[in-house]
Amino acid sequence: MTLTATVLDTPDPRGLARFYATMLGWPIGTDDPEWVMLRPGGPGLSFQLEADHVPPVWPAGPGDPRMQAHLDVAVDDLDAAVEFARSLGATVAEFQPQADVRVMLDPAGHPFCLYLPG
């Protein structure tokens, strides 16, 4: 067996794929209205159309939609990475549990973390 991708649901597969392709510098492979794949040479990311996508809440409270997974992205400069992600359409989550990690929300509301590797 070979893991090929993590898949994120979104109402806009092409838009979310462009966000991650630009942020990570990964090429877009398959590019269909309902399915887009990023393939960096190893396991990548895929984005599938989910018209009724409900963004998870971070941090989730009782009854809130919960994230099922999140992406961790290592960066060299946390402040610069946050600003770059924001320029692409990400937002900084209100709750930040660690000083050397920034929890961000992608344009579809999926949490991801920018962090300084230690």
Image (tube, rainbow, N blue to C red):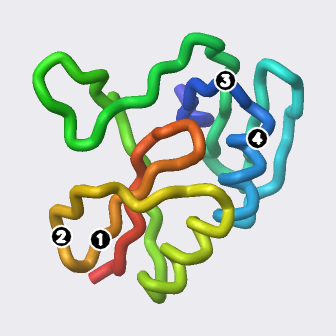
The circle drawn on residue 59 is: none
The residue identified by callout 4 is 15
Question: How many angstroms separate mark 1 from mark 2 (CA)?
Answer: 5 Å
Mark 3: which amino acid? Pro
Question: How many angstroms separate mark 1 from mark 4 (CA)?
Answer: 25 Å
From the top left corner, tell me how far across and down residue 82 is, in percent. Answer: 49, 74
Sequence-first disc among 4 and 2: 4
Mark 1: which amino acid? Val
**Where, by quadrant of the figure, is residue 44 drawn?**
top right
Q: Vertical placement of 115 versus 78: above or below?
A: above
Tell whether label 2 touches label 1 (CB within 8 Å): yes
The residue identified by callout 1 is 101
From the top left corner, tell me how far across and down residue 8 is, in percent. Answer: 56, 31
From the top left corner, tell me how far across and down residue 112 is, in percent. Answer: 42, 52
The circle drawn on residue 98 is: 2
Question: How many angstroms separate mark 2 from mark 3 (CA)?
Answer: 30 Å
The residue identified by callout 3 is 11
**Point 59% across, 45% down: residue:** 107
**Where, by quadrant of the figure, is residue 67 drawn?**
top left
Count how many numbered circles sit on residues in the image.
Answer: 4
Question: How many angstroms separate mark 4 from mark 3 (CA)?
Answer: 9 Å
